[in-house]
């Protein structure tokens, strides 16, 4: 799979087609907006969404963790979509398969589980943004202090590509603007928010297992 490198503060960020960021010098993996448990949340509301919609997310996450063996994994919000359901226990069992990785959660607006649910788990939880080297990790975009890059999620950025004969396709993307890098939503059971990048922005789309420059 073809990634694209992005450098900031002397550190190289690999933008991965799996919709994640890998910082090899720190052995850190960054992922945003997984939204596990969303299908069960819909079923509780009477909408028959099968749990299999999350299967591909688990497969892709397992592949990332197995191939990179990160020391630290930061989830930039919306790890679990809703109030408790049995998929929370499935997620914790999944994390248990990777004892050499430390998992961190920067809480997002959908992470509404009570604090006690995080006790005695492998997750280290932060209610506010976290500074990691030259990066300010948050869920929602926030203007970082001078010299830092804000890496975040929440937006679920996407870009509309137009072709001949009025053909068009929407694809997820990474969006960089004014020292803010927004990650695409990792979860497949999420929508896209189409962005309109400025001339000074950078946009990298994800298509056919490749990260491709759209605007730079």
Image (spheres, rainbow, N blue to C red):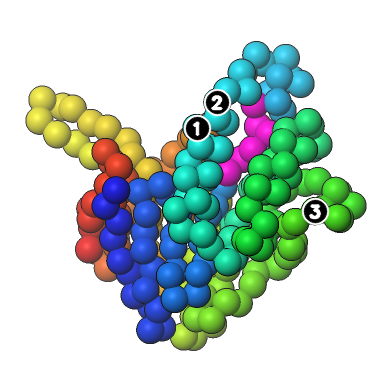
The C terminus appears in which quarter of the rendering? bottom left
Q: Nearer the viewer, residue 10 or 190?
A: 10
Residue ranking furthest to the left: 164
Mark before the other along the chain sequence, 1 or 3: 1
Which residue shows up at 65% across the image and 32% down it? Answer: 38
Q: Are marks 3 and 2 in contact (CB under 8 Å)?
A: no
Residue corresponding to mark 3: 121
Above/below status of 137 relative to 188: below
Residue corresponding to mark 1: 56
Which residue shows up at 51% across the image and 59% down it? Answer: 69
Which residue shows up at 57% across the image and 47% down it? Answer: 33
Residue corresponding to mark 2: 53
**Percent x, y of residue 192:** 44, 39
Q: Main secondary structure of the magenta part?
A: loop
Disc 1 to disc 2, how far (Cα)? 7 Å
Above/below status of 83 relative to 204: above
Please say whether residue 99 is visible from this viewpoint: yes
Tell me if 120 is positioned left or right of 127 in this view. right
Please say whether residue 74 is visible from this viewpoint: no
């Amino acid at each position: 799979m073809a990634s694209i490198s992005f450098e900031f503060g002397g550190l190289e960020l690999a933008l991965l087609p799996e919709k994640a960021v890998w910082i090899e010098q720190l052995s850190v993996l960054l992922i945003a907006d997984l939204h596990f448990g969303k299908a069960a949340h819909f079923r509780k509301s009477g909408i028959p969404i099968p749990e299999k919609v999350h299967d591909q997310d688990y497969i892709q996450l397992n592949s990332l963790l197995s191939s990179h063996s990160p020391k630290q994994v930061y989830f930039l919000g919306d790890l679990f979509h809703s109030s408790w359901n049995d998929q929370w226990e499935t997620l914790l069992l999944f994390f248990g398969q990777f004892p050499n990785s430390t998992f961190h959660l920067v809480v997002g607006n959908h992470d509404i589980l009570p604090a006690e649910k995080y006790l005695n788990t492998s997750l280290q939880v932060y209610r506010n943004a976290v500074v990691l080297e030259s990066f300010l990790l948050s869920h929602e975009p926030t203007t970082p202090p001078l010299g830092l890059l804000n890496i975040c999620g929440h937006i679920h950025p996407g870009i509309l590509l137009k072709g001949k004969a009025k053909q068009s396709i929407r694809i997820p993307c990474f969006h960089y603007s004014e020292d803010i890098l927004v990650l695409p939503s990792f979860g497949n059971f999420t929508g896209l928010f189409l962005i309109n990048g400025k001339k000074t922005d950078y946009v990298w789309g994800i298509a056919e297992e490749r990260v491709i420059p759209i605007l730079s």
